[in-house]
Amino acid sequence: MSTHNKHAITRREFMRNCTVCTAGIAAISTMGVTSLFADNPIAQKLKTRIKVIFGYPDPAYPNWPNIGYDFKGHNETILKKLVKACPEIEFIPIETSSGKEADALAILNADANIDGYMVYLSGCLWGNLTETIAASGIPTIIVDHLFAGSGEFLTSYAKAKRLGNKVIGVSSSDFKDIVDAVKCIDCLKKLKQSNVLVVGGEPDVQIEKTYGTKVHKIDFSEINEFYKKMTPTDIKACTDNWIKNAEKVIEPSREEIEKSAAIYLAMRNLMKKYDAQAITVNCLGGVYSGKMVPAYPCLGFMQLDNDGLVGACEADQRSTMTKLLMTYLANRPGYISDPVIDTSKNQIIYAHCVAPTKVFGPDGPSNPYHIRDHSEDRKGASIRSLMPLGEMTTTLQFDHNKKQVIMHQGKSVENVDEDKACRTKLAVEVKGDVFKLLNYWDQWGWHRVTFYGDLKRPVYNIASLLGFEVIEEA
């Protein structure tokens, strides 16, 4: 047994270590170890295009907010703020003082390759333009310029929601709420351009029908071939990086960690080959059956998640898509787990043998971690991530077959130190009724995916655009 002690590293130290690791892998013709986005950034494929329709009445007449109001000046300010906040998105602005349905249809008929609409009600038009745009089937954001467009916003948004249209309503003095709504449309665009690899499993055809994401079946033999091609120099660089940054290495030998490094590099090569942003592996099924090389991908999944990509275990495609969707929406990795509920403490404990160590995203701080063996069989190498405490978490599962998303929230309170079950065990104090949280597992299965942050509103927004029902399970 080898042991390596180290305090939690700073972001600057982590980036310096990754640079060293990348240098060691430079001989690989495919990619480095720090980030795949440098090789195939999704945002650079096709920009998300949103048409912004600024609607307002003739300022020469009395109306909200007041006669003579400078609507054009306000609209220019809002557009500049949108462009600055979302430089990766193309905004196409138009102005109208007509609320007529015919004019709305003319706007719709003139557009091609539009990913979404924003109807920004600088004032009230009092016609059917907003409702007509919202009913187009194209994702639509309706925004209220407070104390100016409020009357039409309230009536139009309520009607659009009641009709089941793909619409988000923003009635807020915080501009960030508009930006968050825009990110929902950008998320849907990215999902349509994404590829997911399923190693050792059968692709779920409903994923592409729902999200537009292509799912590719990968045989164990293909990942095995990449594994065998990894060179000792490349494997050493990656292994050194993981060990150096770990607070402790407990059970695994260096040889086991090197196997994990090799399978990680093999996954990265596979993802490069298929231009994929997510990979899920039937890991234990492959290892236990002998169909996959005896290398545990847990550390590799950690690294992929830290890089802003998605690594997911057990060929769980539903959780993979939940992670990918929320990575685009919130720029944060998800933590798949098999939860345990302790009603006496009002807690749910998320347990698994893999977790990210950059829970606030690739540019956020790193938390400490221990390299352990895999819990159930006491073999291979996995991770115990000591995640931040005192933070709001949002736990989800998007289901593309049910057209539903299940969700609960809580505050992180403990990294449980218990030898039973999986290595990472994050305890969260449930927000809501812990006994209600017992009621849905037969319908949804055991897995949930946890994200740091209060992401309830973004989840409701993206669910609305997808036509999903939200179930709050606590």
Image (cartoon, rainbow, N blue to C red):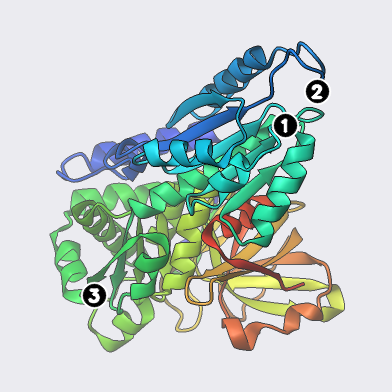
Residue 427, numbered circle? none
Residue 242 lies, in percent from the top left, at: 41, 51
Q: Residue 425: x, y in percent?
A: 63, 69
| Mark 3 or 2: the one toward you | 2
Alpha carbon separation for disc pair 2 and 1:
8 Å
Secondary structure, mark 1, is loop
Note whether 229 is above or below 180 in the view shown: below
Q: Which residue is mark 1?
A: 124
Quadrant where the C terminus sits is bottom right
Give the spatial CA distance, label 3 vs label 2.
Answer: 71 Å
Task: Give the vertical position of 220 relative to 237 (above or below).
Answer: below
Residue 416 vs residue 113, the one in the foreground: 113
Amino acid type of disc 2? Asn
Instruction: Identify the residue position indicated by label 3 in the image.
Output: 293
Q: Residue at x 18, y 54 (%)?
A: 273
Residue 309 in sight in this render:
no
**Considering the image in quadrants, where does the N terminus appear?**
bottom left
Can you tell which of label 3 and label 1 is closer to the viewer? 1
Amino acid carrying mark 3 in the image: Val
- Would you say the residues marked 3 and 1 are in contact, meaning their CB atoms lie under 8 Å apart? no
Residue 138 image point, x, y percent: 47, 50
Badge 2: residue crowd in 10 Å (few <14, some 14–19, many ≥20): some
At 79% from the left edge and 67% from the top edge, which residue is drawn?
430
At horizontal 31% and vertical 80% (from top left) the residue drawn is 287
CB of mark 2 within 8 Å of CB of mark 1?
A: yes
Amino acid type, mark 1: Cys
